[in-house]
Amino acid sequence: MNESLAKLMVAVGDQVVCIKINGRGDFNLSLDLRKLIDELRQRGYRRFVFELRDCSMMDSTFLGILSGEGLKSCDASQAQGSALELMNPNPRIVEVLENLGVAHLFKITQGADSLGVNYQPLTQTEDKSKAEVTRNCLEAHKTLMDLHPTNAHRFKDVAEFLAQDLKRLELAEKK
């Protein structure tokens, strides 16, 4: 099954975007997440709250995309701290963020069950090319490698494989 088992739910407020992740945050979902945040940033939104109570886990690609967005939020934020908040992550997700050396990019909070917002499901992109997904995965892993020195060793082989695979896919697209 190629389809991600997770869903992104979105509620856009006046100044804050709330994104709820149900299920697994994985590589399939990460491309839609990146596109969503990029589009909303272009429309002027700077503060993002991720409700993670129902997010069971995140793979390295999803974490890389999220970390890259956290870095952009820290760079763009004039206020102290991150403009990207992770609300109600389970202990395993917090542990992985700390082990990857990226927890500082986020404001991590625990709170009530609901933010009192009306989430709408985000339709997942159906026509993702393999090259587009691979490029996204490679960029996510490069981000993790750039953010913390120990990640370079962890993801070196993955990044090399993805880079080779991307070259192969791009050559096949040109034919």
Image (cartoon, rainbow, N blue to C red):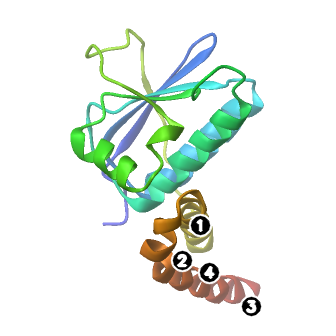
Q: How many marks?
A: 4
Of labels 3 and 1, earlier in sequence is 1
Of marks 3 and 2, the one in the foreground: 2
Of labels 3 and 4, earlier in sequence is 4
Image mark for residue 159: 2
* Circle 2 SS class: helix
Circle 3: residue type: Lys
Q: Can you give x and y, in whole percent of width and height, for residue 14 in the image?
A: 63, 10
Check disc 3: other Cα within 10 Å, few if <14, some if 14-19, many if 20+. few
* Circle 4 SS class: helix
The vertical placement of 12 against 91, above or below, is: above
Outermost residue to the front: 149
The vertical placement of 66 against 77, above or below, is: below
Of labels 3 and 2, earlier in sequence is 2
| 59 or 151, nearer to the observer | 151
Of marks 3 and 4, the one in the foreground: 4
Image mark for residue 87: none
* Circle 3 SS class: loop
Q: Can you give x and y, in whole percent of width and height, for residue 66 in the image?
A: 51, 46
C-alpha distance separating marks 3 and 1: 28 Å
Check disc 2: other Cα within 10 Å, few if <14, some if 14-19, many if 20+. some
Residue highlighted by disc 4: 166
